[in-house]
Amino acid sequence: MEFEPHVTVATVVEKDGRYLLVEEHASGRLVYNQPAGHLEAGESLQQAALRETLEETGWKIELLGVIGISVYRSADSGATYLRTTFSATAVEQVHTSLDTGIVRALWMNHEEMLASSGKMRSPLVITSVEKHLAGTCHPLDLIY
């Protein structure tokens, strides 16, 4: 069988010390995740991050940089994800209709996320926020 990792993007959107998350249905349970999703044909990673965040949260954002690139293997499905995580700031909320499977968008601070760690979709959610808190941010032109 051919190895085909899923190419995904995620955004760590910070506003006033809180982070934009989604509560979504995944693997038969409700979990928290960053706005995230798959790269679609013909779009850049940056375009995918902007689109996914808008579709899942209703927020327009401005990308500030790249937090990192990670490879993650889901224990639930066995699928491998190549995820590019962006740092972003919230610009404006433009609508409240959200993607299928998304229950709501919400804001949490780091401590609230740690207290809810068992509800995170993957360890990458908190790890990405902690990298953001540590100041990890590479220029957007890292991706070309």
Image (cartoon, rainbow, N blue to C red):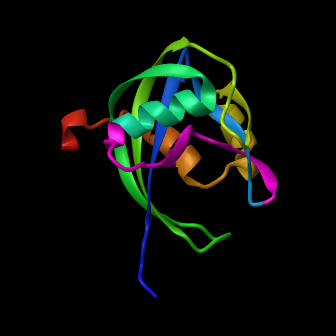
Q: Residue furthest bottom?
A: 1
Residue 77 lies, in percent from the top left, at 64, 71
In this rendering, is residue 139 above or below 121?
A: above
Q: Residue furthest right?
A: 29
Residue 139 lies, in percent from the top left, at 23, 34
The answer to whether residue 40 is visible is yes
Residue 80 located within the stretch drawn in magenta: no
Q: Looking at the image, how many numbered discs can be counted on the residues?
A: 0
For the record, the magenta segment spans 28-46
In this rendering, is residue 47 above or below 24?
A: above
In the depicted view, which residue is nearer to us: 87 or 98?
98
Residue name at image x 36 percent, y 52 percent: 69
Residue name at image x 26 percent, y 38 percent: 138
The quarter of the displayed image where residue 123 is located: bottom right
The quarter of the displayed image where residue 70 is located: bottom left
Residue name at image x 47 percent, y 33 percent: 51
Residue 30 located within the stretch drawn in magenta: yes
Quadrant location, the C terminus:
top left
In the depicted view, which residue is nearer to us: 94 or 81?
94
Residue 31 lies, in percent from the top left, at 74, 47
